Image (cartoon, grey):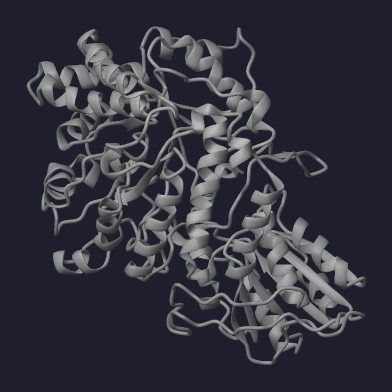
Amino acid sequence: MMHKSKALPVLAFVGLAAGCTTMGTNAGGSGKTQATSARWTDSVLASMTLREKAAQIVWPSLFGDYVSGDSPQWRRLSQYIQQDKVGGFTISVGSPIEVAAKLNALQSMSNIPLLFGADLEAGAGFRARGGYFVPNAIDLGGAIVFPPEMAIGATRDTTLAYEQGRLTALEGRALGIHIAYAPVLDVNNNPDNPVINTRSYGEDPQLAARMGVAFIHGLQDHGMIATGKHFPGHGDTGVNSHLALPVVTASRSRLDTVELVPFRAAVNGGVGAIMSFHGAMPALDSSGVPGTLSSKVLTGLLRGEMGFRGIIISDAMDMRGVLDQFGASEAVKRAVAAGIDVLIQPLDVTQTIDAVVAGVKEGRYTEARLDSSVRRVLETKRKLGLAQSKLVDLSALRFLVGDSSNVQIARRVAEKSITLVKDSLGQVPLTVPSARVLSITVARRADLPAGNAFNAELRTGLPNLRTEFVATEDATLNYPRLIAAADSSDVTIVSSYVGQSWDALTASAPQAFTDFVQTLVQRGRKPIVVAFGNPYMLQQLPWVSAYLVAWGGFPVSQTAAARALLGTSAISGHLPISIPPYVSRGRGEERAVRAP
């Protein structure tokens, strides 16, 4: 990859250290140039009005979709930059070329370089993919998508975690993105967690720490800032902070030995940013406010006790976990007073900037306090080299993003992560190529890729494959027809995409579905269940004889799971979680590649 990075000089940085304090400028810069650029931050800060300072820490969200220049969406973006003078944006979904072109256009409108952040938990392709063309479900391609973090935890391989960080940085920076809102450092020690789940490395704090730090180093060694989230820990909750305020009632001693372990490791490992948790922890702050609004959590614990010197980024400010108690404007003032440096995804951009300014004028915090956050933002821009070069090379992008060698690494991660939790009848791998195999996909109707790559790979070794799709929203589904199909098959595979953590409000499977699987078992059909969604689904299906966890429904994981069932790739993953009361952490039956 090194020969390709020459086409994008914006990528040529040395690694980041704690608080982003030692990131190099563009390669080849002289000491005099660096000394001159070091004065850039002071000059820009001194030229700003109070409201312009406030705008630097307010980052709206935008899609990476195409919009015309006279559309309301584009006019709104232009206003954010030219009138409100925001300091950055959070970029969401879009095709790689459109994302990069759009970010270049926004950069060109701004006198001060913009910072762009994105949720890149599963690689740059987690946000920068072309999607699927309907009604044919044609995959329009994009950047590399890795399996979720819990899959990395199942491999126990820090080298793969580092490689994911490296490729995320190379592809993300080629798109014009500077900050990854990743890794998730939450310890998922609550099986009922509806929002973290497979986004976490697992329930072992030491494993989460090792994997998280490896990812951070891979990312920051290659010019992108990592963001550990959600401080001080979103793992032990059954409440989705998008919808309500979670409360974690653990003691301080438990927090020190579990939740805070990966964050301490990340801070010591030089993570450049930390994202706050919109949830309350009475052991840290008895007032009941979420961590995002707590000075005891952000200034006292994170800055004071843990010594973090990087950027503190809020979780999205339009989430109910931070809005319900105080409303939008008051929440903004409390967040800045608590120590937040950047407010992302506000309900109303102009009102949020006004609220930051009002906080100074009301004496809630000083202008010097605001200056400290603005300085961190500007220094990050300077150290990323954006004052000298803020645009990306669109012609070079095609030879960096989605590169075949990157795809191979994502495939290796997926294959090493596949975990055979249970196989009491020795059904895996499948042994009869001529068998009549029924593959049933259970997913939301809108989940267009569900089952596509899985069944396509199965069909390479199973010419008599029959496929069926079950929409979880369909309460009138004809299960008797599926049972009849299973009765006429030699093998039945049931693949569940239920409870994927980033699109589900609940991790539980519908009762009709679990009843259907139980009926298959009672009729002696011995279904093989593959969990592409919630890995804890075994709790609802404890009577199945074979249970394979693939961790996520992205095509790379679908293909890996099919290869594992066919015996064309080895099975070596081990659970980074327990599935109480049925299996403990570390479980995983290994299988070698089946001899040809």
| Residue depicted at 48% across the width and 16% down the height | 107
Q: At 57% from the left edge and 31% from the top edge, which residue is drawn?
A: 175
In the image, is 327 to the left or to the right of 218? Answer: left
Question: Relative to 391, does residue 316 appear above or below in the rendering?
Answer: below
The residue lying at 21 percent from left, 29 percent from top is 330
**In-front residue for pair 87/39:** 39
Q: Which residue corresponds to the image point at 48% horizontal and 85% vertical from the top-left? A: 582
The answer to whether any part of residue 578 appears in the image is yes
Res 239 quadrant in image: bottom left
Residue 40: x, y in percent? 28, 16
> Is 368 placed left or right of 126 in the picture?
left
Q: Quadrant of residue 8?
A: top right
176 lies above or below 557: above
Residue 437 percent location from the top left of the image: 84, 76
Please state the horizontal and vertical placement of residue 494, each as a whole percent of the image: 71, 71
Q: Is residue 186 above or below residue 352?
A: below
